[in-house]
Amino acid sequence: MIVVVALAGGLGAATRFVVDTGVSRGRARLPLGTLVVNVTACLLLGALTGWLLAHPGHDGVRGVVGVGFLGGYSTFSTASVEAARLLLAGRGAAGVLHAVGMLVACVAAAVAGLWLTSP
Amino acid sequence: MAAVTSPDPLPLPVGALLVAAGGTVGVLARALLTQPVAPGAWPWRTFVVNVVGSLLLGALLAVLQRGPDVGRRRAVRLGVGTGVLGGFTTYSTFALEVEQLVATGHAATGVAYALGSVVLGVVAAGAGLLLVGRVLAFRPPRDDAAGGPS
């Protein structure tokens, strides 16, 4: 089972790379690719969590899609590095906006996803 | 598009395969380390995974950014950075943990966990970037990507 979770995670990570490459093309000043990836990941995990409330007993789905694919698709480390680089480059406001904006947008997306599918 | 500024010998599918291979390893490590937390409890495992992953990614990029992002450097950045460390850490589980803490009446813990993770993650990434950058500054750069003396 854990092998399937890990493979789903690899697929999620590759999806993140492709989406990030597509979003970031030609927009070097503000790193928005990671924001798009993380917000969609949180929306989908919220929706999955809500769906699982209505359909209990699907622990395999939670593991493969939630922990594996969506966990590999979203990333915390890249978000931290992007904000740290903005701060180290003297762009303090952009760095704080990047970190706090990502947090607020992602939690809001998770709540929205839950709301969409909760029984 | 015609906006190619530097020769990129690594096509998108090859990059995606490197990221997928690394991501499989990173997600496996996280799946082995983490488990669901009790309602109201601080999600320590996700917290440590995300902060340590941020530190390691900062340190790795500090090493890699001493040279151009091509060849072996680009392959390591994609496989280990975007793949292993990107897959090891998670924003989706983190955001849902915050939501669950707040929704179950543990708002103070939820806000502390949210801000604590983000602030410590940025500090750890910055520390990795700065400290490893400082250490390496005392050593001559390796010119393995371009070849020849600099």
Image: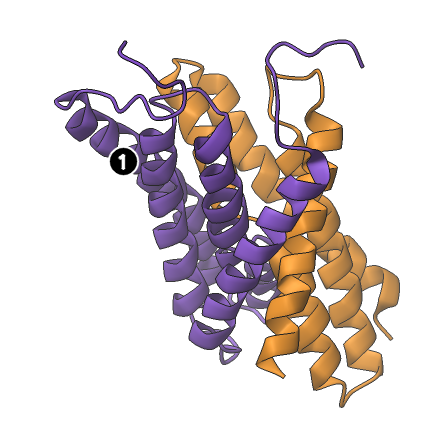
Chain colours: A orange, B purple
Spot the residue most to the front: B148
Residue A41 vs residue B57: left or right?
Answer: right
Residue depicted at 68% across the width and 56% down the height: A12
- Residue B107 visible from this viewpoint: no
Residue at x-position 40% and y-position 45% = B54
- The quarter of the picture where residue B41 lies is bottom left
Residue B8 position within the rendered picture, expressed as x and y whole percent measured from the top left? 62, 22
Which residue is most to the left? B138
Q: Is residue B56 left or right of residue B70?
A: left
Label 1 chain ID = B
Q: Position of residue B9 (x, y in %)?
A: 61, 26
Relative to A21, say whether B6 is above or below.
Answer: above
Q: Is residue B68 above or below residue B92?
A: above
One can see residue B150 in this view: yes
| Residue placed most toward the observer, B83 or B57 | B83
Residue type for callout 1? Ala
> Quick one: SS at disc 1?
helix
In the displayed structure, B109 sits above or below B119; it is below
Task: Specify whether B70 is left or right of A67.
Answer: left
B73 relative to A1, above or below: above
Q: Residue at x 44, y 20 (%)?
A: B68
Q: Badge 1: how crowded within 10 Å, few (<14), some, or many (20+)? A: some
Between B128 and B144, which is closer to the camera in this rendering? B144
Q: Which residue is mark 1?
A: B127
Q: Residue at x 46, y 76 (%)?
A: B32
Q: Quadrant of residue B27?
A: bottom right
The quadrant the N terminus of chain B occupies is top right
